[in-house]
């Protein structure tokens, strides 16, 4: 087994300075608002007490259905885009799949743990995602193993018992989508994802140690080689399965590293609000990333009269080529939007929605249609506003655009100095350096002939010109049509 440990850092800063306009005016459709009748699943007889040693799985199913309308944590899209899996409730917890276009939720299983003659709660299960063929769904769970230090304490009562679990083995579990059977996939692991080509698996080391908790491993499932990355808070594979993009919580920056190791490359984006990225997802086109950012504190006076605060959050879309961010939705006081996930075809976005003022526990799963053309136009307008200022640092829109076979890229520098003008493809790869020289202050223009650095003619598609000077970067989108 080969192990690669990354540590090199590149310093890149992005120039940004305008307020963000929202792309959507509403918050999509709550797919859990269907009026399904959970009472139809209620068994005959008297319900057992919570944590009863006479635990009944039929009652667990009923209670999970009941909790589904009130307590939901996060969701995951099926590979065919027809279902969204949701995790609901904590005691008992349940995993369901919900039709994207409406219909009753389908119960898969509860997430309780059998321990001798007892059934213990697993706690809140976090869904990670599906296997590429859709046959399994992965989620957070625990394994009770006394040989590994787990200590289970049970105190029996007349009709019920109390329990405490110390040092459980945190694990990634899998649920079979046909049978509902649950198995342990990887022990001492959390947050697991397959690459789209199925050749790699990335996961976080499950540990109480703060340093190890920020350590992730990218495993080549064919060669068993492993790439180890430290300080990774959240992470995802790129759609082409060649890289992992991760948020470094210590550096407060987004990085990209090859699945085969090597030095990471910093992605020059400006993270809004709190400067932190709590979780994110990558659009199938590889250009856009949607992330959850902090939007400031909310205040509340509790029943006891005490004053407390809690962070509210907002969703942003960022173009990883240009570095520009857009606020997806207008901020609504005392709301939390989190766990964004693109549909497999990239036409929809799901996320969790919580109204902190109305209900502390009720969480909804919202789905909204994604229109990339509108987001691209907003990015272009935002760049135009920034570059129309009299600062004299500007990268103008290529002309003509679209073009075939040549286009002119003009830019303006406020003062003399070194500048680089390069062309990137939609995957973020630099394909042509048009200029890398010391320029005088003022306006300059370079003609691009639609070829790469090797002189090869490029195919039709979307490309980006990027101007970098000092600590600032600007980018423009252009389309080559043949």
Image (cartoon, helix red, strand yellow):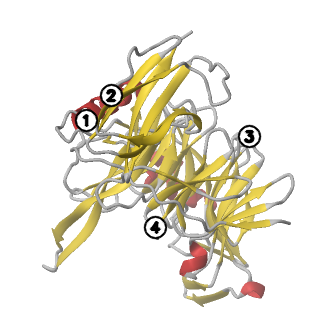
| 3 left or right of 204 in image | right
* Marker disc for residue 396: 2
Q: Secondary structure at mark 2?
A: loop
- Circle 2 packing at 10 Å, graded few (<14), some (14-19), many (20+), is many
Q: Position of residue 218 (x, y in %)?
A: 70, 59
**Real-space Cα separation, disc 3 to disc 4, in angstroms:** 30 Å
Name the one closer to the observer, 383 or 43: 383
**Real-space Cα separation, disc 1 to disc 3, in angstroms:** 40 Å
User: Where is 110 relative to 325, above or below?
Assistant: below
1 or 3: tag closer to the N-terminus: 3
1 or 4: tag closer to the N-terminus: 4
2 or 4: tag closer to the N-terminus: 4
User: Where is 53 relative to 377, above or below?
Assistant: below
User: Where is 402 relative to 469, above or below?
Assistant: above
Q: Position of residue 169 (x, y in %)?
A: 67, 77
User: Where is 233 relative to 169, above or below?
Assistant: above
Q: Which residue is mark 1?
A: 387
**Real-space Cα separation, disc 2 to disc 4, in angstroms:** 31 Å
Q: Nearer the viewer, mark 1 or mark 4?
A: 1
Q: Residue at x 50, y 73 (%)?
A: 49
Q: Secondary structure at mark 4?
A: loop
Do callouts 2 and 1 mark residues in contact (Cβ within 8 Å)?
A: yes
Q: Which residue is mark 4?
A: 251
Name the one closer to the observer, 224 or 193: 224
* Marker disc for residue 197: 3
| 297 left or right of 469 in image | left
Can residue 88 be seen here?
no
């Amino acid at each position: 087994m080969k192990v690669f440990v990354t540590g090199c850092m590149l310093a890149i800063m992005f120039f940004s300075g305008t307020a963000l306009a929202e792309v959507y005016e509403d918050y999509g459709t709550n797919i859990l608002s269907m009026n399904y009748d959970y009472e139809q699943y209620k068994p005959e007889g008297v319900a057992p007490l919570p944590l009863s040693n006479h635990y009944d799985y039929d009652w667990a199913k009923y209670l999970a259905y009941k909790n589904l309308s009130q307590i939901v944590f996060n969701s995951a899209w099926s590979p065919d885009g027809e279902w969204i899996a949701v995790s609901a409730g904590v005691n008992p917890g349940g995993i369901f799949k919900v039709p994207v276009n409406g219909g009753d939720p389908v119960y898969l299983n509860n997430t309780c743990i059998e321990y001798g003659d007892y059934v213990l709660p697993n706690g809140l299960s976090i869904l990670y995602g599906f296997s590429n063929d859709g046959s399994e769904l992965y989620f957070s769970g625990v394994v009770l193993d006394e040989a590994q230090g787990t200590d289970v304490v049970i105190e029996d009562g007349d009709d019920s018992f109390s329990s405490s679990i110390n040092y459980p083995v945190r694990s990634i579990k899998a649920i079979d989508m046909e049978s509902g059977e649950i198995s342990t996939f990887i022990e001492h692991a959390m947050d697991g994802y397959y690459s789209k080509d199925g050749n790699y698996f990335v996961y976080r080391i499950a540990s109480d140690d703060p340093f190890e908790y920020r350590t992730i491993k990218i495993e080549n499932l064919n060669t068993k080689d492993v790439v180890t990355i430290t300080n990774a808070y959240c992470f995802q594979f790129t759609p082409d399965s060649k890289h992992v993009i991760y948020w470094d919580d210590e550096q407060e920056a987004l990085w990209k590293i090859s699945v085969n190791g090597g030095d990471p490359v910093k992605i020059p984006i400006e993270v809004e609000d709190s400067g932190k990225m709590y979780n994110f997802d990558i659009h199938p086109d590889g250009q856009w990333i949607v992330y959850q950012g902090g939007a400031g504190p909310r205040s509340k006076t509790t029943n006891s009269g005490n004053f407390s605060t809690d962070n509210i959050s907002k969703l942003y879309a960022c173009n990883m080529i240009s570095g520009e961010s857009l606020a997806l939705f207008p901020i609504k006081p005392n709301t939390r939007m989190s766990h964004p996930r693109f549909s497999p075809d990239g036409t929809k976005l799901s996320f969790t929605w919580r109204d902190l003022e109305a209900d502390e526990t009720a969480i909804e799963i919202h789905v909204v249609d994604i229109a990339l053309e509108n987001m691209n136009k907003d990015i272009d307008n935002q760049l135009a506003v920034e570059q129309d200022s009299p600062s004299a640092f500007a990268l103008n829109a290529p002309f003509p655009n679209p073009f075939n076979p040549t286009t002119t890229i003009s830019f303006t520098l406020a003062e003399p100095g070194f500048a680089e003008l390069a062309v990137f493809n939609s995957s973020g790869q630099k394909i042509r350096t048009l200029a890398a020289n010391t320029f005088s202050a003022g306006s300059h223009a370079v003609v691009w002939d639609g070829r790469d650095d090797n002189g090869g003619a490029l195919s039709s598609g979307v490309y980006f010109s990027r101007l970098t000077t000092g600590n600032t970067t600007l980018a423009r989108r252009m389309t080559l049509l043949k």
